[in-house]
Image (tube, coloured by chain):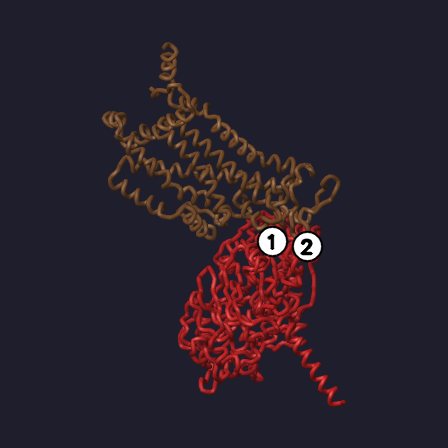
Amino acid sequence: MRKLSVALAVLGLAAICLSLSSCGGGSGKEGGTLKATYASFPELDPTIAFTTEAWTAMYDTYLPLLTYAHAGGEAGTEVVPALAQDLPKISKDGKTYTLQMRKGLAYSDGTPVKASDFTATVERIFEMNSYGAPFFAGIVGAEKFAETKRGGIPGIETNDKTGEIVIHLTAPRGTFTNELATLYAAVLPADTPSKVLSREPPPATGPYEIVKVESGRGWSYRRNPQWEKSNAKLMPDLPSGHVDKIDVAVVRNKATSVNEIERGKSEWMQSIVPADLYNKVKDKYEGTQFRVERPLNVYYFWMNMDQPPFDDLKVRQAVNYAIDSAALERIYSGALVAAHQILPEGVPGYEPIDLYPHDMAKAEALIKQANPAEREVTVWTDNESPNDEAGAYYANVLEELGFDVNLKTIGADAYFGLILNPSTPDLDTGWANWFAEYPHPNNFFELQFSSEYIGNGNFAHFDEPKIDAKIAKLEKEQLGPEQEAEYAALDREIMELAPYAPYGTNTVSTFVSKEIDLDGVIFNPIFGQDLTSFQRK
Amino acid sequence: MAPESHGETRLATAGPWRLGLRRLRRNRTALAFGALFVLIVAFALAAPLWANGVADTGPNATHTLEKVEVDGETREVVNREGRPIGPLWLGAGGKFFLGADGRLGRDEMVRLMYGGRTSLFIGIVAALITLLLATALGLLAGYYGGWVDGVIARLLDVVWAFPVVLLGSALGLALATGGLQLGPLQLAGDSIWIPILIIGVVYTPYVARPVRGEVLALREKEFVEAAVSQGAGPLRVMFGELLPNLLSTLIVFFAISVANSMLLESLLSFLGVGVQPPNTSWGTMVAGGFELITSAPQLTVIPGAMLLLTVLAVNVFADGLRDALDPRAKLRLEAHAGTAEPEGTPV
């Protein structure tokens, strides 16, 4: 009797397992081709790509030594080993990182992955003046290599036989583990030329490889033949993906992309649902085909503190009081979570603050006190909707404060290059955003508020020795509760000086066709949608 | 017989311009469209009156969070989902007559009127630039011939070789960011003069070639020979003899160029390389409204319709003008209209 009940229990359990596997996350169809659309053609070269679109496109193609867990939300901010066997061993002084390349890895063209490829990859970052270069400038000899582009980087020692990689830093850097997991550090063959390879992307190490690139029109992925042969077994924690092929078409009109998904012609759109259709799509499909995602970003207006009138704290504070996040929420059609600080929710160290609740009377009083002699200001923004409208709104707010505004709306492709170029005239104030390259508070402070990055990521020309010292101190330390509290205090201190008028975090959307299992689609806060997670029901 | 001879006497004393005007007056379609164009111009010129006297707002003033009273009911200019209010006609005393333009809540009617000023200004000034350049080049090439003609013809061929839209957008893209610095001429990237110059230049070959052809034919005429034999220099021949005989052609080309320039401006602005914000034109309004085409189609349709009407009005009027001023075309028109009144060759 007892045996029978045990047998029945086992059978029952087996039945439950079977039923679960048939309707759970891993129960969908395998194989086939995923049809997707992008609103623009991203750079398909991991060394130079810096947009979210490009990082999404290459998350499952080019692997660094470390990567971020293929998970959504907070779980997706965890650094996990990729091509490296384990997380780095960090010396006590925080200046030496030792990693071990997994043995037996191969690129999609069959070339073995070697430890020395990492050195070549970092050299390529400097040779191509990648936006990722500042993250690796702390490696011994890197700065000299960045200048001369010759002689190698002595701070990286590799052994192809053992796979050992030792990285020596000039000073401890608490964020270096995160930086090793950025796409810039995706390992490429040592002989990869130092030129943009978007049209003929280099061989891949991840589950998919990019093939058939039609510049400006689209590209395709297919399964990396070396993944199943060798790489998947060596990196069992990384997913292999469900579909065999992914065809991406560039469809610049986002409304067309929505329409194609509704008609079943396409199965996923990488871009966000356009503002005009956002609420309609949200109401109709939320929970079944549509989901709001929250990447780590901050949207703001920067003010150039180098020159009048924004060299005056009162003027900058007045601007902060005058900006009404409620208006901007409408301009972003609800795809904006209002906030008035540098760190967005989800980043360690985030503590909500609002030093400048909207108060036009206070703003006008501050302007009256400051009485700036310089009233002519140029406002810069890009032409991508609704950022262009945010810029126009901001120009209007400044006019209400008594400024004579000249609004310059620049093409999105050229915008950041232009406002970061110190020789561009009239860089008074303007719109910008900042998407985390890694989920660490330093990523929001170092490049934007260290004086050494004026002309790089420091749009406000913010130059405060006290803040510089705090950032420099914190960047050397590994992140812990104490550091998180210090970053929260730093957020407040910077906002007291008001170099920016932040107005919120922009949410994005995942919109898929009814054939795709929305629950299975992973949105990583750093890389966006994970291509390996798309599966047909 | 008598009335006929009386009519011929009257015609013989009328000048070519008077004859042209008379013919134009008989073309009621052209006149109607001409009147429509005048109305559109008046509509655009009245922009400040409407903005200050009725709408009480400027073309760039935003009203995102504001509310309006419509027939005793309070309504948001932009709702919480970012959708703009539709046309209120006179429901709010003329405010938001055509609704708001988008999430910024700017008054669409005010922008339409100011946008019309920009579009018309660009159309007219760009057409003048085209005409100026084309006349100068056509006169030089046609009068001198030889290597001067060769150099000018090749120069025009270079511009002609590129499709107008492609060349216009390439120039617009290059100049919209860096602006234009040509010796003393310095223009900021967002200056309205950038699209004006681009449009003026890219259409030049399309007018210069026929002008050159006409000059080639005219320079063989007896009145030119007579002037030369009386000691007239090249400049006097070109500007004193040839140019007056080109005027009717140039007037027609001017009208056609205005329409073409307005169309190209709207296209360039739609592509983001024409008129730069916050300046507004019908082209930028169509582009701005395009994103909301499903929820607020009027934002695209109304400026688009204004553009269509203006271009149609100018084109039909230009067609009538050509028929009136070009004696070769008049016979065609009259045969088609079935009129038997003899015109004779103007004396």
Q: Amino acid at mark 1?
A: Ala
Residue behind mark 2: A326
Percent position of residue A447, x then y: 56, 67
Circle 2 SS class: helix
The chain that appears brown in the image is B
The tint of chain A in the picture is red
Give the residue displayed 49% in from the left and 77% down from the top.
A227
Q: Which residue is mark 1?
A: A390
Are tags 2 and 1 found on a single chain? yes
The disc label shown at residue B68, or none: none
Q: Position of residue A153 (x, y in %)?
A: 45, 78
Instruction: Give, as a three-letter code, the residue at label 2.
Output: Ala
Cα distance in 3D space between marks 2 and 1: 12 Å
Q: Is residue A251 above or below residue A32?
A: above
The residue located at (35%, 17%) in the rendering is B12
Label 2 vs 1, first from the N-terminus: 2
Pick the quarter of the image with the C terminus of chain B: top left
Q: Chain of mark 1?
A: A
Residue at figure coordinates x 48%, y 26% from the top left: B28
Identify the subunit bearing mark 2: A
Q: Around disc 1, counting alpha carbons within 10 Å, would you say few (fewer than 14), some (14 to 19), or many (20 or more)? A: many
Residue B121: x %, y % from top left = 49, 38
Q: Secondary structure at mark 1?
A: helix
Along the viewing direction, whichever of A95 and A517 lies nearer the viewer: A517
Q: Is residue A356 above or below residue B229?
A: below
Taking the view exactly as shown, the residue that stands out farthest to the right is: A1
